[in-house]
Amino acid sequence: MTDVVQVLSATPTREDAIALARSAVEARLAAGAQVLGPVTSAFWHNGEFGTGEEWQLALQTSLDRYTELEKHLIERHPWANPQIIAIPVVAAPASYLEWARTSTAG
């Protein structure tokens, strides 16, 4: 396993996802970000089943910067309880891992 993680979140609009991506990368909390969508989600919310259209946000960062990135996303996210999860990057080219570490060096 490496010290790089992929962080996933979702937003209600494309504009929200782009704003979060830009602010995180500009602050060097993420090396890069992709906005995907729209995607269809199925979920439980306030005890009720629902479906909806969302925009997925994928960010790449070092494990050292995850806590700051999480805080940044929570403070700026339009939802009160957003999905923010980190998935370990188990393997990747050394040059990619170095890019992620260097780009997020605080």
Image (cartoon, rainbow, N blue to C red):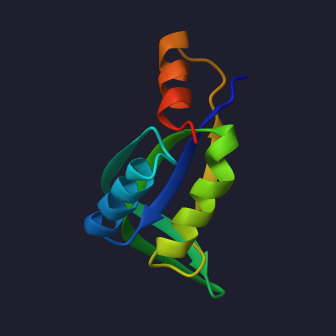
Determine the residue located farthest toward the left in the rendered image. 15
> From the viewer's perspective, is residue 38 above or below residue 36?
below
Q: Position of residue 96 (x, y in %)?
A: 48, 19
Determine the residue located farthest toward the front in the rendered image. 106
| Residue drawn at point x = 35 percent, y = 61 percent | 17
| Residue drawn at point x = 53 percent, y = 20 percent | 98
| Number of numbered discs visible in the structure rendering | 0
Determine the residue located farthest toward the top in the rendered image. 94
> From the viewer's perspective, is residue 2 above or below residue 79?
above
**In-image side of 78 versus 71 (left or right):** left
| Residue drawn at point x = 33 percent, y = 49 percent | 36
Instruction: Name the residue nearer the viewer: 53 or 68.
Output: 68
> From the viewer's perspective, is residue 21 above or below residue 61?
below
Q: Position of residue 10 (x, y in %)?
A: 46, 62
Pick the quarter of the image with the C terminus.
top right
| Residue drawn at point x = 41 percent, y = 55 percent | 56
